[in-house]
Image (cartoon, rainbow, N blue to C red):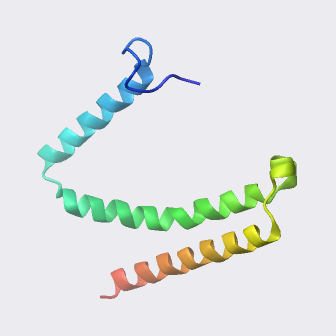
Amino acid sequence: MWKGGLHYKVKQASAFYGIIVIAMILGLVLNFVGLDPIRALIYSAIANGLIAPIILFLIVIIGSNKKVMKEYVNSKTSMISGYAISSLMAVASILTIIYLLNP
């Protein structure tokens, strides 16, 4: 596990500070390329909405696996509600794509 946090010195958490530097450079490059930041936020929100249901399904599957979770396995209610919420998010994502492609 690598150290991370602003309370560490640069030599103590070089990977953490390296990621901050890379993110800042990427932000500067995107600024000079002329990319509209609001449009970038909208696209990132759309991407998040498309990826989130997949990740939630995987979390519910792992959380319901007794081999992995042992005594902390999800209850039936938690599993059913997790699948229901993930399904609703998936439907909302699909409808978003349909409405974006057919205005």
Q: Residue at x 81, y 51 (%)?
A: 72
Closer-to-camera residue (99/42): 42
Closer-to-camera residue (6/103): 6
Closer-to-camera residue (72/96): 72
Q: Residue 59 sits in which quadrant?
A: bottom right
- Name of the residue lying farthest toward the front: 7
Q: Position of residue 8 (x, y in %)?
A: 41, 18
Q: Residue at x 17, y 58 (%)?
A: 36
- Name of the residue lying farthest toward the top: 11
Q: Residue 89 sits in which quadrant?
A: bottom right
Q: Position of residue 15 (x, y in %)?
A: 44, 23
- On screen, 12 above or below 103? above
Quadrant where the C terminus sits is: bottom left
Quadrant where the N terminus sits is: top right
Q: Position of residue 23 (x, y in %)?
A: 31, 37
Q: Residue at x 48, y 75 (%)?
A: 93
In the drawing, does residue 6 fall left or right of residue 73? Answer: left
In the drawing, does residue 5 fall left or right of residue 61? Answer: left
- On screen, 66 above or below 53? above
- Name of the residue lying farthest toward the bottom: 103
Q: Position of residue 81 (x, y in %)?
A: 69, 74
* Total count of labels: 0
In the drawing, does residue 44 fall left or right of residue 33? Answer: right
